[in-house]
Amino acid sequence: MLNEKMYALGNKRSIIREIFEYCKSRAGEIGPDKVFDFSIGNPSVEPPKEISEAIIDLINNENSVLLHGYTSAQGDLGVRQAIANEINEKFGAGVNENSIYMTCGAAASLTISLRALLNEGDECVVFAPFFTEYRVFVENAGGKLVVSTPMEKTFQIDVSDLESKITEKTRAIIMNSPNNPSGVVYNEETIKAVCKVLEKKQKEYGSPIYLIADEPYRELVFDDIKVPYLMNYYDNTIVCYSYSKALSLPGERIGYIAVSPRAQDSQKVYLAVCGAGRSLGYVCAPSLFQQVIKRTIGAKVNVNIYKENRDILYNALTEYGYECVQPDGAFYLFVKALEDDAYKFFEKAKKKEILVVPCDDFGVSGYVRIAYCVDKQRIVNALPAFKALAEEYKK
């Protein structure tokens, strides 16, 4: 017999992937320049030049057996030291190499962390709108996903709603800022209020509640917006980081987990992370790219390209009558569908070759996500179609 849960996951892909595959098929029929695909968060900005320089130098000048060989299960010691040093220089968090676990990107970081923290039946709270795979990751770890409803219009966290969702079974909370799909950055006032609630509930129930900071978009922020580093606000924090967006390396699958040294029984938590990585087969992240990261600490992509895309799209769509959430980071525009049913809106948009993602699976109905991490010309070329779609609804 098959595992029916795994069969169901394989038989029905995420809606993002379904649309992405449809786009490839449709582009083959009518040409890629005639399909306006905004479905997937695949960075369109080139990686920093330091990346290719580091790869070339490593391949040409390092011992190839060592370069392509196994590292320690939790990652190369020198790489973990370099990452810990960067975190401390930027945020003063006090982490060390034994706080860091190298992973195959943010998905592995989250999956490992949840497996380390959750027992069967434990609850994990997420803030809507949330990345759809959170549900898969939480349930695969034996947990139950609990959704906290956001503030209307701003999509900041509704702290009162959060407090009502925390129970004695709550073991973790996932916070994603800048947020996918809304682009919202949770402000410091909100962060402090959330942490106050968590501290209160920990005392009330007599057990730790862990705050998992999902941070693949940390560096993708605009207009001098600051992203609070959660480890400095709440002791029981685990940071799940990925270089996929910050360095435009989604296909290389490299990231890390950082456990706060001030977490309750922090070393036991770290060892649970190591054990979870072992049980899932997520040991020894790609060796080459561990070394690439070590050599390129501090490198960044040109976020101004995303900012220009955001401004073009946001300004045009609001002019056409769409209601959009102003994104402060990431590369997504969260748009209210022009009818209550986001799937019907998606189908009408698809007839005009516009591919956006309905967000019911993100925990908020009636909205769609537009990924503007695309060539600027695609946005410009799509604007007449967006305008025609809006005019069609007005009629």
Image: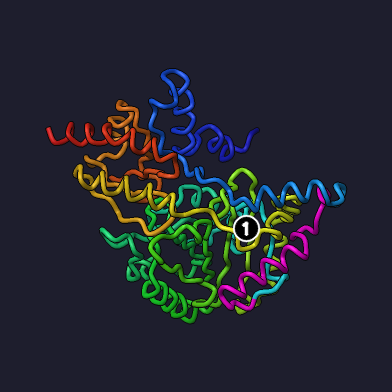
Q: Amino acid at mark 1?
A: Arg
Instruction: Indicate the quadrant where residue 27 lies.
Output: top left
Q: Position of residue 56 (x, y in %)?
A: 74, 46
Answer with left or right where residue 101 lies relative to residue 171: right
Position in image of residue 184 (x %, y %):
37, 59
Task: Measuring from the top left, give residue 6's x and y in whole percent.
Answer: 59, 39
Q: Residue at x 44, y 80 (%)?
A: 200
Q: Is residue 197 visible?
A: yes
Q: Residue at x 58, y 48 (%)?
A: 47
For mark 1, give the secondary structure. Answer: helix
Quadrant containing the C terminus in the rendered view: top left
- Residue shown at the point (68%, 57%) measured from the top left: 293
Residue 365 in view in this figure: no
Res 294 quadrant in image = bottom right
Above-or-below relation of 262 to 371: below
Q: How is the image coloured?
A: rainbow
Q: Residues within 10 Å of mark 1 (few under 14, many from 20)?
A: many
**In the image, is residue 110 above or below residue 383?**
below
**88 falls in the magenta region:** yes
For residue 49, side relative to residue 98 (left or right): left
Residue at the far top: name it: 29
| Magenta-drawn segment | 67-94
Q: Relative to the observer, which residue lies in front, 159 or 322?
A: 322
Q: Quadrant of the N terminus?
A: top right
Q: Position of residue 71 (x, y in %)?
A: 80, 56
**Residue 57 magenta-highlighted:** no
Q: Which residue is mark 1?
A: 115
Q: How many dots with numbers?
A: 1
